[in-house]
Amino acid sequence: MLGHKSKIFKTHPAISLDQLVPLNNFYRKLEAKLDLSFVRSLVRPYYSPQKGRPSIDPVVFFKLQLIMFFEGLRSERQLMEQVKLNLSFRWYIGYDLDEAVPDHSSLSKIRERYGLEVFQQFFEQIVERCIEAGLVWGKELYFDGTQVEANAAMDSLKPRFYVEAKHHLTALFTELADEMPAAATPSGNNRPSTASRSFVNKYSGERIPDQTRPVSYRRTTDVCANRTDPEATPMRVAMNGLAHLGYHMHYVVDGGKARIIVAALVTPASVMENTPMLDLARWVRFRWQLRPAIAVGDAKYGTKYNIVGLEQDGVRAYLPPHDQEHLKHVKYYPKSQFRYDAENNRYLCPQGHPLPFKHPVRSLQLYLYRAKKATCEACPVKTKCRTGKYGRTIKRSFFEEYIERVEAYQQTEAYQKAMRKRQVWPEPLFAEAKQWHGLARWRLRRLIRVNMEGLIIAAGQNIKRLIQHTARPLYPAEAPRSNLLFSSSVLYSVA
C-alpha cells in the first residue's frame, strides 16, 4: 500500500533545545573544552558602561566566527541562515528555538568596532591555553608562507593615484561621526595597545628603505592598485602561471608534536615571504618567553639579513643560504672553488693565483677581491673563470663568518632532519586551511580585515589541536613550560 505523509506540525512545549542536540555533538565538545568568557574583558573598553542598549554578547560573536571556520562558510549571510536551521549551532551560541538570531549585518559592524587589536588578543589567548596544556615545545620554530588569492580581480587595476584620490575623497566627504557610535572608539586609559598594527603597517606593501639593496626596478603595485582592494598586489600562481591579486599568509609553527601556530601575519603579495621572518622570530621569543635552539625555513628564507640576525640572537639558522655568486656564474668557477687566505686577507683561485683585497663596498656590506687582469689573461682556464674585462672578482660579505657557519650546518644530521621535518610541519597546516577552512581565497578585503580573517583561521587550527589534547603531554619531559611574563602590550614591539 502506497503511503502518504501529510505536513501536520504540533507544538511540543516539553521539548528543549538541549535535549535535541546529541551528547556526542562536536560543538558540545568545543563548549566543554574552550571557555570563551575571556573575550568580554578584551572588548569592554569598546562599550559604554552606562549608556546605550545591550550589545550582542561578544562571546556569541566569536562563537559565530568559529562556526564559520569549522564549517568552511564563505559569507556571514550564509552563516546566519545556517544558524537559524542548525540546532547545534543555536545551542552553541545559546539562542533558543524561539529566539531571533543576530542579523548578518551586525557581525560586520562588530568586527569594525573591535578592530585588529581584539582579534590579535583573541589569537594570543588561544595560544596561551595551548601553552598551559603543554602543547608548545618551544625548542624549534618553523617558518613558512603561502599565497592566498584576494577577493578582487586583476581587471579592476587602475592607476594608483586615481584609486588613492578616490578613496581620499570618499573618506573626506563621508560623515562618519553620524554613522559610528561614540563608544566604538575607546579613549583615555581604556584605549588598548595599538602595537598589534606595527607589523601590519611596517609590511603594508610599501618599499622598506634599505641602503644595502638599492631599488633597481619599478613594481606593478607602485603604479597600479585595485579599486575594491587597493592593498592586494599581483602575484603569479604556480598552478596556471597567471597573475592574480593576493596576499601572503605567514605562519610561525612550534616544533612540538601538536604543531601549534605561535604567530600569524598577512602581508601584501609584494612582500616576500622571507621579509618579516626576523621580526616574527623575535616577537615569538619575547611574547611567549621561548628559547628556541633552531629556526627552520626553506631556501627563500636564507637571506643574509635573516641568517645574521638569527645567529646574533643565539638561534641556529637552519636556512639554505642564497648562493648569488653561484647563480650568477653558473657556467664558471663558483665562489666555493676559491680558498680564502685569512692570514694575507686574499683569495686563491683553483690555479693558485691570488685575488688580493681591493676595497670595501659599504653600501652593499661587501669586500671586493680582484685578480690582476694580466694574470687572468695568461691563465689556461680563463674561459671557465673570467666573466668581464677585469680580472676575476670575488665578493665577501661583512658577515661571511655567519654565512660559513650556516653552510657548515648543512653537513650535519640535525640539519637534514629539520629539513625533512619542515615538509610535514607548517606546509600541511596551509593545505588544511585551504581545503577545509576557506584560506584558498580571502573572504574580506583590505589588509587590516584579511589579517583579522587570518588570525581567526590560525586560532581555529590551534583550537582543533587543543580540543584533541589528552592528559598525556605532547612535549619532551626535559622541556619546561613557558612562563608567560609578557602581556599583549609587547606585541610586535620589535618592529
Image (cartoon, rainbow, N blue to C red):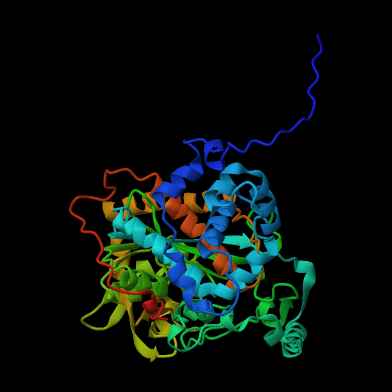
Q: Is residue 193 above or below residue 380?
A: below
Total marks placed: 0
| Residue found at the very far front of the displayed protein | 13
Q: Place residue 103 in its image quadrant.
A: bottom right
> Residue 234 location in percent, x, y?
67, 69
**Quarter of image, res 440:** bottom right
Q: Name the residue rendered at 43%, 87% in the picture.
A: 189
Q: Nearer the viewer, residue 222 or 345?
A: 222
Query: Looking at this view, is 364 or 395 the one in front?
Result: 364
Q: Nearer the viewer, residue 412 or 388?
A: 412
Residue 343 lies left or right of residue 338; in this view the side is left
Question: Is 7 rendered above or below residue 115?
Answer: above
Of 76 and 202, nearer the camera is 76
Give the image location of residue 241, x and y in percent.
Answer: 68, 58
The residue shown at (56%, 36%) is: 20
Q: Is residue 348 visible?
A: no
Placement of the N terminus among the 4 image quadrants: top right
Residue 105, percent from left and from top: 69, 65
Residue at the image position 58 percent from the left and 47 percent from the top:
89
Q: Quadrant of residue 323?
A: bottom left
The image shows residue 376 at horizontal and vertical percentages of 43, 78
Is 199 rendered above or below residue 357?
above
Looking at the figure, which quarter contains the C terminus?
bottom left
Residue that appears at 32% across and 70% down: 285
